[in-house]
Amino acid sequence: MMSLALAAATSSVVTPIPSPTSLLSLNSAASDVVEVKPNQDGYKWRLLLSYDGTRYAGWQYQESPPTVQCAVEKALIRATKLQRKDLQLVGASRTDAGVHAWGQVAHFLTPFNYDNLDSVHAALNGLLPSDIRVREISPASAEFHARFSVKSKIYHYKIYSDTIMDPFQRHFAYHNMYKLNSAAMREAARYFIGKHDFTAFENASHNDRIPDPVKHIFRFDVKEMGALLQLEVEGSGFLYRQVRNMVALLLQIGKEATPPDIVPHILASRDRKELAKYCYYLPPHGLCLVSINYNESHLLPPPGCPAKSFGMHHTIRKCKVVF
C-alpha cells in the first residue's frame, strides 16, 4: 500500500519549470503540466493536521525523543524526494509535549507544482504513523505563512470530574475527583477576556525569542457535558504554557480554594511567582489545539494550482460474472 501511494504521488508531480522556453516544450510533451508561476521560494502548500500527542515531545523538530514535526518531515522527504532544508516546514503552533491537536496548520515548499493533490495526500498518510493524520492539503499563496498569518487560535482543555476516571478519556482529559463550582469558574474566566499582559501566566522557556506578553483573549467558555468539563479559550496568541496555567487557576477557583476576583490581582502582578501561590502544575494531556483562524486574504488559492484535497474515498467496483 505504501509503495503504491508513493508511486501515485510521484506520478502527480509536475516537472519543475525553469524558463518560458522549456515551458513550451514541456507543454507539448505532457498535457497535464500546469502553467503557474511559482513564488520566489517555489510552490507553497498548506497542511491541516491532527495528532494524538501522547507519545511525542511536542511539535518542534528534534530527532530524539520523537516530535510531530520530525515525523511529518520524514514523510514529506519520502513523498517529495526533497531534503529537509528545501521543504522548510513551518507549524502554526509549537504544541508542548503530550498536547494534542485537531487543527494544527503547517506549510512547506516544493520547487515543482502538482496537478492533483489527492495522490500526495494519500502518500503522506500512508507514510505517517497512525496517531498523526493530514486532514487536508491545499495550495497556498506566497503571502500565507502558517505562523505569521494567524488571527486567532482556539484551545480546549478537558477535565473529567468524577470519583472514577473513564478509561476512554484517560489520554485526553485530566482526572479531577473534587466537586467543581462551574459558575465560579465562568465568572473567573470572564476576567481573562480582553487585552492583558499575561507575564504572570507564562512559564520560563528555553526559546531564544522574547514574545510579546500582551495577548488578546476573545472568549473563554466553560462548558459542562456530563462529567466532562470543557474549557474553550480563543486568543490572538498564547505564551508558553499560558493556557494550562489559566486553566490551573480556574480549577482551584472551581474547588472554591480561592475566589474568582483573584484573576485581576494575578494579572496585575505580572509575576509568575504570584500565580504559584494559588495553583499547581496541570498535565498536558487534557489540552488540544482545536483550530486556527487566518487572515482571509491569505487563504485565497494562487491561480493555476490544483484543488484542495480532503482525501480520497474508495469505492467497490462491481465485477462482471461470466457464465
Image (spheres, rainbow, N blue to C red):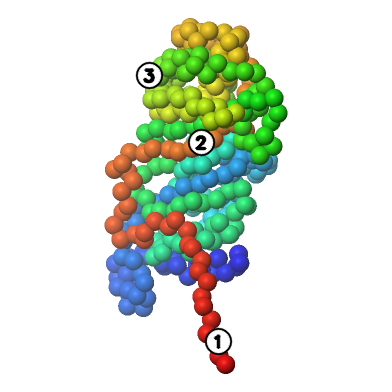
Which circle, 1 or 3, is nearer the viewer?
Answer: 1
Query: Left or right of 189: which side holds 54?
Result: right
First along the sequence among labels 1 and 3 = 3
Q: Give the camera-side residue of 50 and 313.
A: 313
The amino acid type of the residue labelled 2 equals: Leu
Quadrant containing the C terminus in the rendered view:
bottom right
Q: What element carries label 3?
A: strand
| Residue 238 seen in the current view | no
Q: Which mark is residue 321?
A: 1
The amino acid type of the residue labelled 3 equals: Gly
Who's the residue at 44% across and 56% down the image?
Answer: 310
Q: Where does label 2 land, which residue?
A: 289
Rendered view: 142 above or below 233: below
The amino acid type of the residue labelled 1 equals: Val
Q: Which class describes the residues within 10 Å of circle 1: few (<14), some (14-19), or many (20+)?
A: few
First along the sequence among labels 2 and 3 = 3
Which circle, 2 or 1, is nearer the viewer?
Answer: 1
Q: Where does label 3 land, which residue?
A: 194
Distance between mark 2 and mark 3 Cα atoms: 20 Å
For residue 221, what is the image quadrant?
Answer: top left
Q: What element carries label 2?
A: strand
